[in-house]
Image (cartoon, rainbow, N blue to C red):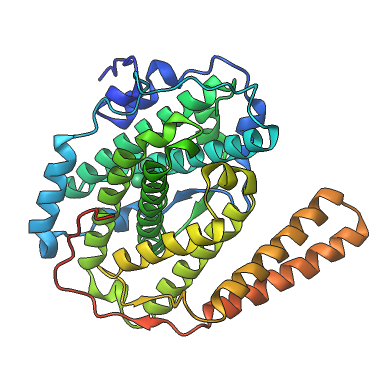
Amino acid sequence: MNVQAKKHSADATTAEEGLAADNMAMPVDSKMATEVAMQNTLLTPRFYTTDFDEMDAIDVTPVREDWDKLIARMQSDPNKGHFKKNEDWDQIDWDGMDPGLRREFIDFLISSCTAEFSGCVLYKEMKRRGSNSDITTLFQLMARDEARHAGFINDALREAGIAVNLGFLTQKKKYTYFRPKFIYYATYLSEKIGYARYITIFRHLEAHPEHRFHPIFKWFKEWCNDEFSHGEAFALLMKTDPKLTSGGNKLWIKFFLTAVYSTMWVRDHQRPAFHEALGVDPEWYGQEVFRKTSEISKQVFPLTLDIDHPRWIPTLKRLEAANRQIAKAKAQGGIGSALDRVAGSAKAAAAFLSLYTIPAVKNDVPVETRLEPAY
Ligand SMILES: [Fe+2]
Ligand SMILES: [Fe+2]
């Protein structure tokens, strides 16, 4: 089948069409942006691969009713054509922007674009390898959405003279293998925390439009509704097998919750100018997003993290300080800084362990999984 290139990724009905859209072409040399997106550290978005045959074997019969409703809603495609510039898109003076803010905001856009694209690549691959029509239908719909999201961020970056070379990333970026159950935990959380992050910024800017320093934030509501649906799909996938959320797997769920929350905290604190421009205190923002994500994740996870525990915030701050030490040592190079790096890593590991051992809050998972975006 010949895939006809569409004008814009927003109008694409499949991931393949989206990736072949005109706005995905690279009109400028963006070596820097691609290099940033190529980075593989604990804090940067990764590309994943998994055991696709095991995922293909999932039987959604136990959740059939909710499943069919979710797929029907995604197929009705309420956001088709939405993710492109229109008359609401205000012109941005990139050259006049404070250089610190410009650097952090571009870093934010590149890492968001990489994360969207990483989802697109994983979902597209599942759709390509699978033969179970429930699974391939879902993954093709999610890949479609992520291609549109990545394309839209690329549009915003292009105005700043930057574009991430997505084709190059697909071929050259390292893929991390996760067994399917880890994909469920990690991807479910990243979709739901993505929803919580975007809706919190959207609501904040609704109340304080003077802080909306870039038009892309106006698109966050529909955007996060897509992520919410993707999270719903993973919640249903986990519901098909009660073993995934019981017994020893509870320790894995706690591990992923701790890893996802603490990574977000550290990464956000690396962008002080960005948060100041938004008029958002990163500590308030972090706790607000954790609270929403925890509340949502009660639909499927048998525990939530105790983010009001007296050790929680002080230990996140220690983790953040350890990460700053590691970054500084890396930038300096040399023997002394190598030792500094080891010391920083030991401190980071100790802080993570301390966070992980805060007693979790038990949750009785409801029979009914389905949720609506309520924030
Ligand atoms: Fe997305
Ligand atoms: Fe998503």
Q: Is residue 128 visible?
A: no
Q: Nearer the viewer, residue 23 or 128?
A: 23
The quarter of the picture where the C terminus appears is: bottom left
Q: Nearer the viewer, residue 116 or 274?
A: 274
Residue 318 in the image: above or below residue 55: below
Q: Nearer the viewer, residue 30 or 246?
A: 30
Q: Tell me which residue sits at (31%, 16%) in the image.
A: 6
Tell me how many marks there are: 0
Q: For this view, does 233 lie left or right of residue 320?
A: left
Q: Nearer the viewer, residue 316 or 166?
A: 316
Q: For this view, does 363 lie left or right of residue 26?
A: left
Q: Residue furthest right?
A: 335
Residue 187 in the image: above or below residue 6: below
Measured as percent of width and height from the top left, residue 243 is found at 28, 76
Q: For this view, does 64 lie left or right of residue 189?
A: left
Q: Tell me which residue sits at (49%, 41%) in the image.
A: 112
Q: Tell me which residue sits at (37%, 54%) in the image.
A: 196
Displayed quadrant of residue 89: top left
Q: Is residue 312 visible?
A: yes
Measured as percent of width and height from the top left, residue 188 is found at 35, 58
Q: Residue furthest bottom?
A: 359
Measured as percent of width and height from the top left, residue 202 is found at 38, 44
Displayed quadrant of residue 35: top right
Measured as percent of width and height from the top left, residue 274 is found at 58, 43
The quarter of the picture where the N terminus appears is: top left
